[in-house]
Image (cartoon, coloured by chain):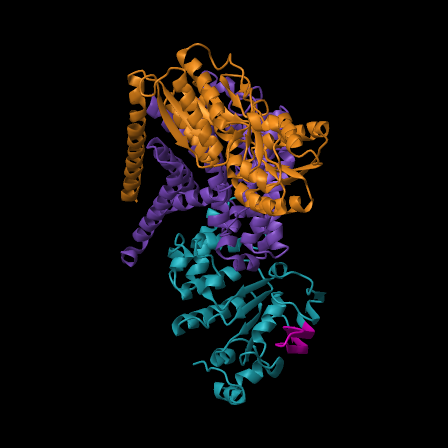
Chain colours: A purple, B cyan, C orange
Amino acid sequence: MVLADLFISTLTQGFLYALLSYGVFITYKILDFPDLTVDGSFPLGAAITGVFLLKGVNPFLVLLISAAFGALAGWMTGFIHVRLGVRDLLAGIITMTALFSINLQIAGSNLAIGRDADTIFTAASTMALLGSMPLMMRKFIVSLVLALLVKLLLDLYLKTKSGLLLRAVGDNSTLVTTLAKDKGTTKILGLVIANALVALCGSVVCQEQRAFSSTMGTGQVVFGLATVIIGTTLFRRFGFVKGTTAVLTGSVFYKICIQIAISLGLPANLLKLAMAVLFLFILILGDRRKDGAENA
Amino acid sequence: MLELKNITKIYNPGQVTEMCLFDKFNLTVDEGQFVSIVGSNGSGKTSLLNIICGSIPIEGGEVLVGSKDIGKMKDFQRYRSIGRVYQNPSVGTCPNLTMLENMSLADNKGKTFGLSFGINRARENFYKEQLSILGLGLENKMDVKLGALSGGQRQAASLIMSTLTPVEFLILDEHTAALDPKTAEIIMDLTERVVKEKNLTAMMVTHNLRYAVEYGNRLIMMDKGGVVMDLSEEEKSALKVQDILDVFTSISIECGN
Amino acid sequence: MGMKKFISISMAMVMGLATLVGCGSAAGSASKGKEEAIPVIGISQYGQHASLDNCREGFLQGLAESGLVEGEDFTVDYQNAGFDDNITIQIAQNFSANNVALMCAVATPSATACYAAAEDKDIPVIFTAITDPVEAKLDTGNVTGTSDKLPVEEQLELIRALQPEAKTIGILYTTSEPNSVSAIAEYEEKGPDFGFTIETIGITQQAEVLQAADSMIAKGVDAISNLTDNNVVGVLPSILEKTNEAQIPVYGSEIEQVKLGCVASAGIDYISLGKQTGAMAAKILKGEATAKEMPYETISSFDTYINSQSLEDMGITVPAEIAEKAIEAAN
């Protein structure tokens, strides 16, 4: 059924990219750090994935390897910012720019992964559980499981002492120092975790598309910020909804909006404008609910 | 116990605005002393605290705790044994975290912030107990985000948080300056109680002469990077505010109550 | 708290319903064709670009020339991704969900996305304007199409004929473009056969092209040859400004570039390429062959295009044999 198919594949995209939203959620919302590394760590995950999948490495292992490399990228930005004293925005830009070259060095050039190489959607373990289902459903379920699993782990982590300290450093870094903790190290930790998640997203997207292109990172930070802001704004009134849930919804919502625009035949040039208008609308709506008269 | 030895501090070295604040400055604070520090703006009071805590670098001299030179230690390392309450009430607590979360953070000072649960529900009653001492009703606001509370309430919480875990020094940097008179009194009372009960060595910078006279067991007046008056407990108790004020005439500062 | 939960749940339901309706109404119009059993061809074009547009137009012409009438034998759903990789993916998924009969992908990113989305339903994918389908892993499976592999030898021959004294040829290219990289390799392999040394400068993004052009000019090359590199071709007019001043002839890779001012090209007519693709698509639609069975095709004949005005500006005289068969591209 056309409608169901469309809905399912769009939801899949939303779940896959939610991983990126989680990463941006950590840096932007929790650390209050505008992190542009994302545009570089996302394709980093994809580049690593491309290279390793072509070598026949277990695709689930590749997920972890990609995340590890993303962590490294986050560490680089953190180091440049904390130890070398470069501004947050610029530190991210430096890493992102460096990664553009590094990614190409890793992959060689744009990569295509033939159907003979296994991905997490076609690996033996996946087939054992879901083999009877068509590929589209397998993608849907695997991405749903991933999105929820990572969300759960993240929620749990934010409840730990380390997670609490992370939340504190973005809220009031002076207090962290007074608590005898190095706020620099804490920030670096946050960047490491966030970019590991972003690279993980790059990895699953590469596995889903079976391709790496050096430009696939462009604009991802914008997407991440949009989903985080949309998600948190939509749920601002509902304090009981966790941040991770909100951004997961934001990602799904964003992808659905694009799909609607495509289905309606909106030309791509206007599509970006439409998204911008929608974004503005949501922001205003969210603010009005909060401040009441001010924006009336 | 705390000794500042030949401290030299120059602001903006090598530039047009170069200013030497401390030139071989010396000060010793014994264990158990509760020192009030008063002085004009620019006399070096806050710089003194910052030098002790490691927030600003020095051009010469040593900062000794016991006999150990802590001059090489970074600020966050020094805070392991120092508690500090700042003048700005927003700086002592996390506005987007709840009272319970803030207290949990403070409770974990000195320990690892690992993967165990951030909030220890078993300790919640202890936190409430500590907060109830204030008499401000904060113990009923465990799930309220600190940003929603008033400056006075946040400062009160900061004071509790700063001494929740054992520290050797308590640094109070004009911590009542931003509070209304009633709350300021409450905080000062509490400060005295906490210092006494926990046997802390405390250094309090204040602009309020009355507090300087009434609280603590030592009074220091600073001017232009030097100590111009250093009164022990007996000398202090014999004084009235007016006496100190007279000394202040040559240095213009605001009066307390 | 109860009220908030109720509001949020109902809001979620409303949002869900709205999206379903939105997708439904849009999908409905597409599947209307299906009800009447007219196959839909989904054309996914990576972005707006003269060569890519030509491919698409040629494709439609090719279908027409095979006897298929638009509106009767097929309908077209044309989507342009505006060079956005994410949108390219969702376009492909849209086609798959709508059960199009055939996906036509113009340029590599669109082809990769279409092939990934088509896997489930085994919808045939036809691509065009991909230089190296083998590299892109699009040479096997229910996918076929046409390759715009550059006629490197013919180009070298042309340059040699027009500039008998030339020694070095400079080429600007994007390092991450596998199409460009493989073309460079071929140039370097075959260049010496014609007595040329090849000078290359690689760039990573469009903003660097003009500076690279300056460097290339400073190297004192005798001629510059273009690949079908999107970044370079995108700023061709600015490049030509510089090279014209330095009196260095630039050879294009297809007719559009010669129209813009390149002196000549042994090149691909993208409309012809598109037509060839359209013919292949027609076979699939008519059921005469499947994409699995059809190997991808390269364009077999090349035309020589010249721009007499540019040639005159460069002081190049065209030998008679070439002038005879060359197609004048200048306005």
**Range drawn in magenta:** B4-29
Horizontal and vertical percent for residue B150? Answer: 39, 63
Question: Quarter of the image holding residue B78?
Answer: bottom right
Please name whichever residue, A56 or C198, is drawn nearer the observer in this view of the structure.
C198
Query: Is residue B13 depicted above or below A167 in this figure?
Result: below
Query: Is residue C59 depicted above or below B58 in this figure?
Result: above
Q: Quadrant of the N terminus of chain A?
A: top left
Residue A44 seen in the current view:
yes
In the picture, measured across the screen, residue C118 lies left or right of residue A280, that is right
In the picture, measured across the screen, residue C325 lies left or right of residue C277, that is right
Residue A60 seen in the current view:
no
Horizontal and vertical percent for residue A262? Answer: 37, 33
Query: Is residue C52 depicted above or below B89 in this figure?
Result: above
In the picture, measured across the screen, residue B143 lies left or right of residue A212, that is left
Horizontal and vertical percent for residue C90? Answer: 42, 31
Question: Quarter of the image holding residue C262?
Answer: top right
Please name whichever residue, C15 or A1, is drawn nearer the observer in this view of the structure.
A1
Please name whichever residue, B166 or C275, is drawn nearer the observer in this view of the structure.
C275
Residue B18: say if magenta. Answer: yes
Residue A44: say if magenta. Answer: no
Q: Which residue is depicted at the point 47% across and 68% down?
A: B190
Horizontal and vertical percent for residue C154? Answer: 62, 26
Please name whichever residue, A93 or B81, is drawn nearer the observer in this view of the structure.
A93
Q: Count of labels shown?
A: 0
Q: Quadrant of the C terminus of chain A?
A: bottom left
Residue farthest toward the front in the current orientation of the protein: C320
In terms of secondary structure, what is the magenta stretch mainly? Answer: strand
